Amino acid sequence: MEEFEDDFEMISDDVDDPEIIMLTELGSTLINAILEKEPISNVRDLIDAGAPLWYQNEEGTSVLHAAAYVENEQLVKLLIEEGAIWNAVDHLQNTAGDIALSLNDAACYTLIRDAGIRSEMLLTLLSSQTSLNPTPSSLVLQGTDNSAVASTDAFLSSHLRYTRDVHGQDICLLELDDGQEVGVMMGWERDIMQKTVEKLCIDHARRDKGLKVLNVGFGLGIIDDFFQNLSTPPALHVIVEPHHDVLAHMKEQGWYDKKGVSILEGKWQDCIASEALQGFGKFDVIYTDTFSENYSELHTFFKHLRELLAGPESRFSFFNGLGATSAFVFKLYITPNLTHLQDVLFYDVYTHLSELHLAEAGLDVAWSDVDVSSQKDEERWGETRKYFSLPIYRLPIAWSKAN
C-alpha cells in the first residue's frame, strides 16, 4: 500500500497542475455518474472524453467499485473491457469483487474474478517470454517483499525455531531481522494434511503394495508423519528439503534413519536439474508445500509433474494458500446475507488460475472444501503473522488426464 500512498501524495503535491485537476474532475464525475445510475451512454461519453478508469476518490472508491455497488452487470463488463483495475482496494481494503460478493451479486463477482484470472494468465505469459526481470504477479505464496518471508535465498539463510505455542501446538517460526516471528508451519494445519493424505492415498490402486511418495518441503513433518502412518507404509518416501535448520530438526527426529525414507538436501529446482529425483523413478503420490516461493515457481513445478508421476492413477496435491493472504489484506465486509468475505476474491482467482495451469500441464483437478474455522485467530496464530486467513481451505487433488 505504501506505493499507492506515495502516488496519492504526488498527486496532492501537483493540485495546481491543470491536467491533474482535469483528470480528477473527470474521474470524480465518472464515479458519481455510475453511483447515480445515469445511462450507460453517459458513462461511455465520459470515458471517451478521457475520464481515467484508474481514478479513486477520497474514500478509495473506483469506477469498478461504483459499478459493483449499483449491481450493474453490463457496466462492470464495459469498465473491465475498457481497462478498469480489477484488484483496486478502497480505504476499507475492499475490492469491487468483495462488494459484489457482499451483495450476493454472482454475475458481477464472476466478471471481476474472471478479469483477475485473465490478468494473471497474461502476466504469467509475459514472464515466460522474457529472460530479463520477470513480470510480477499479484501473488506470492507466503509473502510479498524481499525479506526472508518472500525471498527464497533470504529464507534459506535465515534462522528457524521449532517450539510449541501457549496452546500446545507444534510450530516452526521464522525469525525476521526486526525481531518479529512468522509462522512457517503450524499445528493447526494437521486437519488439512490428514485429509490431503486420505484423498491422495486411501483408495489408491497401489496403496496395499506400498506407495512411492514424494514430498517437497518438510516444515513440521506433519504430512510426512501421516504418510508414514498409513496401514501400509510407503515403499519409498522421498523428502526434498533445502533449509539447514529443518534438516537439523529432521536428523534430531530420526528421519534420516527411517526405513524407506530418502532425503534430498537442496531445492527441488536443483534436484530436478541434477536428475537426482529421476534416480528414484516415478512416483505414485506427490505433494509440495514450499515457503517464500513465487507462484511462478509452483507453476514451473506443475510442468514437471508429467515426468514425475507414475501414471494416470498417480496423484498430486499442494498446500493451497494461493492468495489467502495477499499483498492487499482485505477487511471483512459483512452484510446480513453473507459473511467471511476476507480475501475470498484473491483466493478464488488463484484457485482457478492454478486449475488452468494444471490443465495446461496435462492434469485434471478436483477440489474439496475443508472447514478450518474452528480455531480462533489467537489460538491458531498467537503472535505470529498470518499466512492463511480464510475459514474454508480448498484442497486440490490432481491426476494425469486420460490419453
Image: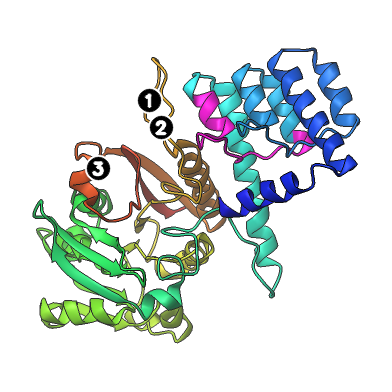
Q: Would you say residue 59 sits in the magenta stretch?
A: no
First of labels 3, 1 by sequence position:
1
Q: Are marks 2 and 1 in contact (CB under 8 Å)?
A: yes
In space, the residues marked 3 and 1 are separated at their CA atoms by: 16 Å
Residue identified by numbered label 3? 377
At numbered mark 2, what does the secondary structure look like: helix, strand or loop? Answer: loop
In percent of width and height, residue 250 lies at: 18, 77
Residue 268 in sight: no
Report the predominant secondary structure element of the magenta stretch.
Answer: loop
Q: Residue at x 74, y 30 (%)?
A: 79
Residue identified by numbered label 1? 339
Q: Which residues are magenta?
A: 81-101
Q: Amino acid at mark 1?
A: Thr
In space, the residues marked 2 and 1 are separated at their CA atoms by: 8 Å
Q: Amino acid at mark 2?
A: Leu
Q: Would you say residue 96 sits in the magenta stretch?
A: yes
Quadrant position of residue 253? bottom left
Q: How many marks?
A: 3
Q: Are marks 2 and 3 in contact (CB under 8 Å)?
A: no
Give the number of the disc on residue 72: none
Q: Nearer the viewer, residue 260 or 176?
A: 176
Q: Closer to us: mark 2 or mark 1?
A: 2
Give the number of the disc on residue 332: 2
In percent of width and height, residue 151 lies at: 46, 71
Q: Is residue 50 above or below residue 192?
A: above
In percent of width and height, residue 238 lies at: 27, 75
Q: Nearer the viewer, residue 386 or 261?
A: 386
